Each structure stands twice: as C-alpha cells, then as structure tokens.
Image: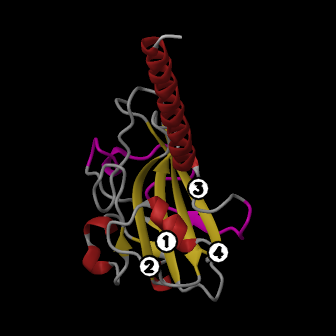
Amino acid sequence: MGKGRRLAIGIAALLVLIVIFFVASLIIWRSSRFKDVVDAGTVPVLTVTSSSFADGSMIPSKFTCDGGDISPQLTASGFPANTKSLAWVVDDPDAPIGTFTHWVIFNLPTELSSLPEGASARPENLLHAIQGKNDFDKIGYGGPCPPGEKPHHYIFHAYAVDRLLELPEGATKSELATGVKGHVLAEGKLVGLYARGR
C-alpha cells in the first residue's frame, strides 16, 4: 500500500472518530437538558398553585414574551418541617433543542413560600434569595416564547431543600441540580401552556 493511500485512510479514520465524538457529545448534552433536578417519585410531593393561571391551563400573555414578561404568582405548600430553603425552576420540555430553562431561583426562605407576580423583577423583596441564569442567558425570569403555533408545556417546579445552597447569582439549572443532590426533601409542580399568536 502506498504512502499516500495510507495517509488518506488515516485521515478518513480520524474524521470518523471526530464525528462519533461530536454525536456522542450531542446525545449527552441533550439528555442532560431533559433531566429534571430530582427523579420523579423519589421524594414527597409539594402542593403548587398559582392565582395567575390554573394547572393545565393557558398562561396569560402578560407572563410571556408577548406581554409584560413578568413572573407569575406562585405558591408552594406542604413542605417538611426541616426545610431550610425553597427553590424554583421553570422550564419548557417541548423546546426544539431540548428542555429550555426559563427561571432558576433558590435559597428562598420558607416565609416566601408564596411569590407575588413580578417577584423576579424585584430582587429587593426576595429576602436574600438568589436568581440563576436562564437559557436566554439572562439572570431572572424569562417568560414563555415558543416557536410555531403548537402550545408548549411550561413546568413550574418547586423544591423544598434542607440547606442553603452555596451557589452564586447566575448559577444554571445544572449547577442547581448538583448543589441540591441528596438535599431535596419534597418537590411539586404546576403546568401551564402557551402558544404564540393565539
């Protein structure tokens, strides 16, 4: 076999390995985006409600990119007595690129088990709670803004945590998941739907 042919075969093999590496990385990345902070059914259930919309109903546009883009009213109840802080994660599992995170907030004291509308925009009223970075690459709440006409599901997850988290402002959902591993006492969720142009 000539030297040129061996070189061509080596380059082709290298390209195949590069493609395999990138495909594997993409699969791992997508699977991590779909993963919840804790596995479903592994902890007790919190009750999550909102005066802004009912579970399973359409989210009013004022809480989306088509309106005021303000965070809705949210209430979590039924958390265990040894809960030290609360955390919320809002995400869209129907996004084309995988689960899209709209809000990460943690270290909420239990007396803030009920968040008023627009809480994300008023951090001075959050009693030292910390907001993370959403997938719009911004800190705080980013409302539903789905592509296409089909409604997306927006899941408002609440977590009762047995400690305060040593995470900075701008922490991601993935960093939150790592920080609360083994420390989530209970979780609950509220689901809203939204489609643009309706």
Dot placed on the residue nearer the N-terminal end, 2 or 4: 2
Give the residue at mark 3. 36
Q: Are marks 2 and 1 in contact (CB under 8 Å)?
A: yes
Q: Are marks 2 and 3 in contact (CB under 8 Å)?
A: no
User: Could you give the CA–CA distance between mark 3 and mark 4, rounded to whole angstroms?
Assistant: 14 Å
Residues 189 and 174: in front is 174
Secondary structure category for the residue under label 3? loop
Dot placed on the residue nearer the N-terminal end, 3 or 4: 3
Give the residue at mark 2. 107
Count of residue discs:
4
Residue 19 in percent (x, y) is at 49, 28
- Image quarter where the N terminus lies is top right
Judged left or right of residue 9, residue 70 is left
Dot placed on the residue nearer the N-terminal end, 2 or 3: 3
Q: Residue at x 54, y 61 (%)?
A: 157
Give the residue at mark 4. 182
| Residue 18: in magenta span | no
Dot placed on the residue nearer the N-terminal end, 1 or 4: 1
User: Could you give the CA–CA distance between mark 2 and mark 3, rounded to whole angstroms?
Assistant: 18 Å
Q: Nearer the viewer, mark 3 or mark 4?
A: 4
Residue 11 in percent (x, y) is at 44, 22
User: Could you give the CA–CA distance between mark 3 and mark 1, rounded to whole angstroms?
Assistant: 13 Å
Most extreme residue toward the front is 2
Q: Amino acid at mark 4?
A: Gly
User: Could you give the CA–CA distance between mark 2 and mark 1, rounded to whole angstroms?
Assistant: 6 Å
Q: Residue at x 55, y 37 (%)?
A: 24
Give the residue at mark 1. 87
Q: Amino acid at mark 3?
A: Asp
User: Could you give the CA–CA distance between mark 1 and mark 4, rounded to whole angstroms?
Assistant: 14 Å
What stretch of residues is rendered in magenta? 41-67
Q: Are marks 2 and 4 in contact (CB under 8 Å)?
A: no
Residues 185 and 110: in front is 185
